[in-house]
């Protein structure tokens, strides 16, 4: 929800900062790695109980996640490889943050870490539905609890000491997003898809195509079989 409504405006606001980092030679992949390291630091801070500093680390990781896309598009370096790397780093970051939350809650109750695990599992399912839908040509963005909302809710829970109630809210909204995405993709995938035209491959330069050579051989053999047998016999009798 936040990603669809406010992401473009936030990226425009962060545009000058992204341009400055780009002039300094900071690449999008380097910023992705920096955001992942911030998530590692945040997870350690949450697990050790330093929730105030953990909020700073979580916000820094979120800003880095926005800036890597700004730098990639601004420098013309956006590519499928970079998008794949960023997506995997996001999933690792989510697992680290919620793992730190589970470690922190283990001291408050034996069942509370399961709550953090459930939020993490549902979040991974949201991301999987989007990736699988896009692989079959169906858009599956949107929902009440995407990655931007998870960062915001987690920061609020850490800052105000209401982590457990916030996790329950995150779990309910994430499950609703899972069901909503499944419903939308299931309906859209039932529609007939347009077949993609197959473009024939051109033969390599300097090498005859194997198919053309085999076709010419078949034509030569067929032409030989079509000749009259008495002419072939006469040619064989000639000295």
Image (cartoon, grey):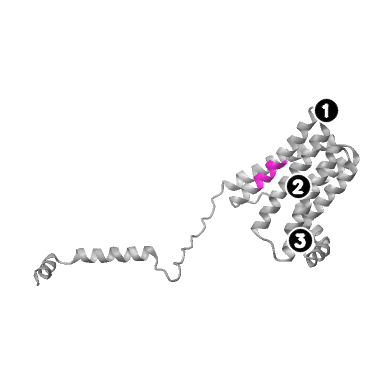
Q: How many marks?
A: 3
Q: CA distance from mark 2 to mark 1?
A: 27 Å
Which residue is identified by label 1?
109
Find residue 173 and report its image quarter. Answer: top right
User: Residue 8, how many percent across, how many down?
Assistant: 77, 58
What secondary structure do most residues of the magenta stretch adopt?
helix
Residue drawn at the location 77% of the way across and 62% of the way down: 26
> Considering the image in quadrants, where does the C terminus appear?
bottom left
Residue 70 is marked as 3
Span highlighted in magenta in the image: 123-130
Q: Is residue 34 magenta?
A: no
Q: Earlier in the sequence, mark 1 or mark 3?
A: 3
In the image, 120: left or right of 162?
Answer: left
Residue placed most toward the observer, 200 or 105? 105
Q: Which residue is mark 2?
A: 147
Label of residue 185 in the image: none
Q: Residue at x 70, y 42 (%)?
A: 124
């Amino acid at each position: 929800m936040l990603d669809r409504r406010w992401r473009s405006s936030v990226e425009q606001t962060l545009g000058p900062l992204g341009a400055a980092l780009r002039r300094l030679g900071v690449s999008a992949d380097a910023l992705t790695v920096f955001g992942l390291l911030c998530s590692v630091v945040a997870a350690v801070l949450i697990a050790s109980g330093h929730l105030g500093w953990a909020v700073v680390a979580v916000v820094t990781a979120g800003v880095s996640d926005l800036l890597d896309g700004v730098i990639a598009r601004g420098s013309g370096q956006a590519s499928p490889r970079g998008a794949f790397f960023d997506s995997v780093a996001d999933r690792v970051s989510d697992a680290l943050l919620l793992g730190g939350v589970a470690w922190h809650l283990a001291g408050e109750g034996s069942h509370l870490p399961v709550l953090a695990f459930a939020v993490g599992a549902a979040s991974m399912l949201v991301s999987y539905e989007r990736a699988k839908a896009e692989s079959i040509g169906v858009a599956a963005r949107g929902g009440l609890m995407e990655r931007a909302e998870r960062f915001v809710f987690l920061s609020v829970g850490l800052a105000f000491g209401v982590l457990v109630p916030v996790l329950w809210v995150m779990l309910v909204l994430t499950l609703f997003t899972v069901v909503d995405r499944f419903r939308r993709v299931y309906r859209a995938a039932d529609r007939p898809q347009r077949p993609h035209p197959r473009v024939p491959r051109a033969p390599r330069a300097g090498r005859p195509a194997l198919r053309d050579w085999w076709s010419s051989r078949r034509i030569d053999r067929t032409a030989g079989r079509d000749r009259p047998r008495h002419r072939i016999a006469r040619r064989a009798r000639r000295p």
